[in-house]
Image (cartoon, rainbow, N blue to C red):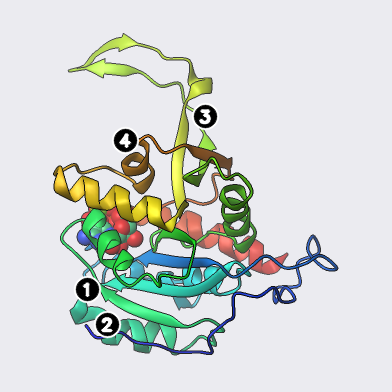
Amino acid sequence: MGPRSRGPRTSGASRPCPCACAERVGHEAPAADTCAIIVAGGSGERFGDPRGKQFVELCGLPMLSWSVMAFDRAPSVARIVIVCAPERAAKVEKDVLSPLTLAKPLALAPSGATRQESVRSGLSALPRDLEFVAVHDAARPLVETEMIERAVATVREDGTLAGAILAARSIDTLKLVEGDMIVATPDRSFYWAAQTPQVFRSAKLVAAHRAAAREEYEGTDDASLVERLGGRVRVVECSRDNIKVTVPEDLAIAEATLERRLLT
Ligand code: CTP
Ligand code: MG
């Protein structure tokens, strides 16, 4: 899949906040120093729709469109890379992107056999001059621009951090189970459910993916790859609304949340 560009290039310089969010009006806008990588290359087996869950309609638009809009509005984001199956690139163009008016340059990258390989492919389209990278699952369409900004700011403001991820405190009592026997009931207050976006210093995430590929390590998220190299990663508390649509029932929950937001 060849590189693809659309929209004007944004400079790295500060500029007025295009989303006019109340918190930032009158303040200097953050630098546009982040590349967003949205992974949309999965087959959605558990969801079970032959179109792929990322293309299923959510409040009138394909699921993937909602994440693209949230990142496009984020002042920190300079560029967006969508990772998708090459045979679905035309569908992304037509169904996901053409209904949107985007301000940021956007490129497509080919997906891999696993999520980790898809992120790696997205990283190969990373511009050298962007200090941060935000990796996001297309299956989390409810991500909000404000939370993207909060995660990027957390890494930007603390030079000792390799990354910061959105996460929600565990509300369930967790059991460590072997077979069907409970082995332990750990203290729930130490457990958080990882979400996306997960934001990193670009060099740290590239190094972590290289090491994982070399050592044939497969993690369930990007933070785990950075953690195993000793990188410090902070959690940024996010609402549980930022769900990952995995099974068909999740779509109704996502739709109800989005409708509520669109009405308020
Ligand atoms: N993903 C990807 N490339 C893959 C596998 C997954 O880009 N080879 C993306 C999915 O499109 C999704 C995100 O990674 O946005 C999280 O994955 P998941 O929710 O597991 O989606 P799927 O892999 O599509 O679903 P399933 O595991 O049920 O097949
Ligand atoms: Mg999967």
Q: Give the number of the disc on residue 219.
A: none
Spatial CA span between label 2 and label 3: 38 Å
Which residue is found at the position 25% from the left and 54% from the top? 116
Q: Which residue is mark 3?
A: 171
Q: Amino acid at mark 2?
A: Ala
Q: Nearer the viewer, mark 4 or mark 3?
A: 4
Mark 2 vs ligand 1: CB under 8 Å? Answer: no
Q: Which residue is mark 1?
A: 85
Q: Amino acid at mark 3?
A: Ile
Q: Is residue 141 left or right of residue 41?
A: right
Indicate the position of residue 109 as horizontal and vertical percent values: 28, 75
Q: Which residue is mark 4?
A: 228
Disc 2 crowd, CA 10 A, few/some/many (<14, 14-19, 20+): some
Which residue is found at the position 47% from the left and 45% from the top? 162
Disc 4 crowd, CA 10 A, few/some/many (<14, 14-19, 20+): some
Disc 1, SS: loop
Disc 1 crowd, CA 10 A, few/some/many (<14, 14-19, 20+): many
Q: Which residue is mark 2?
A: 89
Indicate the position of residue 250 as horizontal and vertical percent values: 41, 53
Q: Give the quadrant of ligand 1.
A: bottom left
Disc 2 vs disc 1: Cβ atoms closer than 8 Å?
yes
Disc 3 crowd, CA 10 A, few/some/many (<14, 14-19, 20+): few
Q: Earlier in the sequence, mark 3 or mark 1?
A: 1
Image vertical order of residue 51 relative to residue 205, above or below? below
Disc 4, SS: loop
Disc 1 vs disc 4: Cβ atoms closer than 8 Å?
no
